[in-house]
Amino acid sequence: MKRSVLINSIRESKSYLCVGLDTDLEKIPSFLLQDEDPMFAFNKSIIDATLPYCVSYKINTAFYEAQGLKGWQALEKTIKYIPSTHFTIADAKRGDIGNTSTQYAIAFLKNLPFDSITVAPYMGEDSVKPFLQFEDKWAIVLGLTSNSGAMDFELKTLDSTPSVKLYEAVIEKVSTWGSIENLMFVVGATRADEFINLRRLAPDHFFLVPGVGAQGGSLEEISKKAMNKDVGILVNVSRDIIYASNGTDFADAAGLKAKSYALEMATYL
């Protein structure tokens, strides 16, 4: 998906909501387990209910990989069910030596019709560049994450330049490998105090922001601190939407929850 198309979608729908399909067989309504493909049955209902209120879907591949072949089949059916009007993200956090990353890129950006994939930048430029070679496809590189382990590396200052944190050096460097047309950054919602600095580092790039809802990130604070002139953010909500109910009304409840997020987002645009 082109950047201009994504921006128009956000403007027209007055939403920058990304729904995370972190589908866990232990958490979906039990009656769905009788279905031939319970993961896809759940996802299909969630997509149908939330489609009017979001602009994007993020599929966390770990939940599907854990189920072996059946999980991969559910993933493939899910990504093909999502209409092309919505930006799709393979949350796979890949990144390896160049020839291996090339195969990951082919898998998710060519053979599976994802618009983007999350990428870990630890191994450097040659591990990220293969994901930037596909027209109208995106690499979403880990920038500053919301987990407690971010203190181990990301928020440490560099010995060579004590005023610079590692995540700052990563974002500055990675920004030179692609462009605002094919490169985004993952920034956790619980790091809202860093958003102004993040916008200084990457003023025009899109940010994918997980951590709102169950993880406690503030939608209002993110929206006020992280937006740029093109909105520039996709706020991902997973559990708070898809598990809004565990009953037969699970899809309706998810739709209502997504709608409430979209209505709040409209007030910040």
Image (cartoon, rainbow, N blue to C red):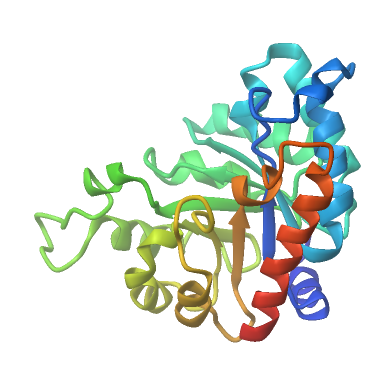
Where is the N terminus found, in terms of image quarters?
bottom right
Q: Quadrant of residue 138?
A: bottom right
Q: Is residue 47 visible?
A: yes
Q: Look at the picture and state if 208 lies above or below 249.
A: below
Query: Farthest top residue?
Result: 69
Q: Is residue 269 visible?
A: no
Where is the C terminus found, in terms of image quarters?
bottom right
- Report the side of 33 relative to 211 (left or right): right
- The residue shown at (85%, 57%) is 51
Q: Position of residue 109 (x, y in %)?
A: 73, 41
Q: Look at the picture and state if 231 lies above or below 124.
A: below
Q: Quadrant of residue 15?
A: bottom right
Q: How many numbered marks, from 0 up?
A: 0
Q: Position of residue 260 (x, y in %)?
A: 70, 68
173 or 1, which lies in front? 1
Q: Look at the picture and state if 26 lies above or below 122.
A: above
- Report the side of 246 relative to 142 (left or right): right
- The residue shown at (89%, 49%) is 48
Q: Position of residue 218 (x, y in %)?
A: 47, 68
- Report the side of 33 relative to 117 (left or right): right
Q: Quadrant of residue 53?
A: bottom right
81 or 24, which lies in front? 24
221 or 165, which lies in front? 221
Q: Look at the picture and state if 133 lies above or below 178.
A: above
